[in-house]
Image (cartoon, rainbow, N blue to C red):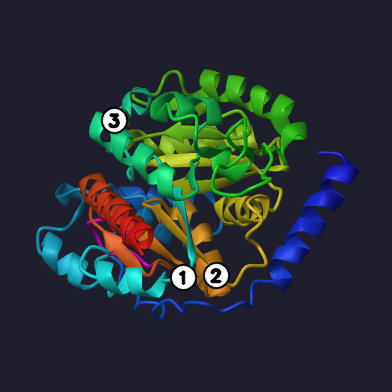
Amino acid sequence: MTRQDIVSVSSTMNNMTSNSAILSHKPPPVPGKYMLNLPMCERHLLQDLDINGVSWVDSMRASSPTHLKSIPSSITSSDSLAMLKQPSALDMFEQIIKASKGKQIVMFLDYDGTLSPIVDDPDRAFMSDAMRRTVRKLARYFPTAIVSGRCRDKVYNFVKLAELYYAGSHGMDIKGPAKGSKHLKGSQAVLFQPASEFVPMIDEVYKALLEKTKSILGATVEHNKFCLSVHFRCVDEKKWNELAHEVRSVLKEYPKLRLTQGRKVLEIRPTIKWDKGKALEFLLESLGLTNCTDVFPVYIGDDRTDEDAFKVLRDRGQGFGILVSKIAKETNASYYLQEPSEVMNFLQRLVKWRRLSLRRQFRL
């Protein structure tokens, strides 16, 4: 990234920060904390990484898959959800609509675990045709962006909807519809890649990790252009420590890269101050909505990396985040949905409400 790029990003973020105090809808209070107990082998994996100390334990909790086998037998799914403290976005749909009255809704959607189920093979995380039709209809009525840790091209190939905005690599690779957004007059095509200078380094680390992890059955390294993902969902728990040591042995030579935790995945990213929350703010600015008091962003995601976006919305006091989870997690989201099928239900209700609302306006 050039000095000019840095100045541009810094200026952009300063402008965003100065406007973050605008209050149009105050989300519910931050929920109480509740954490499930960790298996000892999972604690050891993160301790062996020797990064951020105990916070890695919390990170592993957030990375647990959202199905019942991840919940201790003494705690049922309904018990866990009751401890979340956030209300269901489906149960609170009418209140959500009331809060958004007179405002421009903008939709931000994670992909894995939100629009598609979590699967063992990341290359087979296909969204259903019904979900695709739902997202297509959603984009007719609201500006819609997919914000994913995946490579932008890869997530586009999953979604296959050209009318959306896409923010891949945890927001480090952003591109909008070629003709701009139909929802705003004069909007231009968007292309933003704040971590371009790290591409050669990411390529080097990718090759090194492939070599280091090839003997660990079930481990896969995914190249996401501006970041890397080391998946261990299919790795025997007895091999987690070995995998952690191999990852650490590579990254110790690259101080400009940092390691974070996702759901059964280790994420390797440049150390620049950019994440899904920054991507959300950048997209709002690109849509000309940064200074608006009548914007209502909604971000739906299931991963720890989505917390950056949830926090931005809570700090702005505009819109809200929806956590997709069946288990209790500490979160900055205001509401929850249990799984992708509930996400689709929520989006379908939103589309139906907007369609009926426009019909009433037309009659008047």
Q: Is residue 329 magenta?
A: yes
Q: Quadrant of the C terminus?
A: bottom left
Q: Amino acid at mark 2?
A: Asp
Q: Is residue 358 magenta?
A: no
Q: Amino acid at mark 3?
A: Asp
Pinpoint residue 115: horizontal percent, then vertical percent. 33, 41
Nearer the N terminus, badge 1 or badge 2? 1
* Bounds of the magenta segment: 323-330
Residue 324 visible to the viewer = no
Q: CA distance from mark 3 to mark 2?
A: 41 Å
The residue to which callout 2 is attached is 294
Which of the two residues, 218 or 31, is positioned nearer the viewer here? 31
Quadrant assignment, res 227: top right
The residue to which callout 1 is attached is 102
Quadrant assignment, res 161: top left
Classify residue 329 as left or right of residue 146. left
Which of the two residues, 282 or 358, is positioned nearer the viewer here? 358
Which of the two residues, 110 or 183, is positioned nearer the viewer here? 183
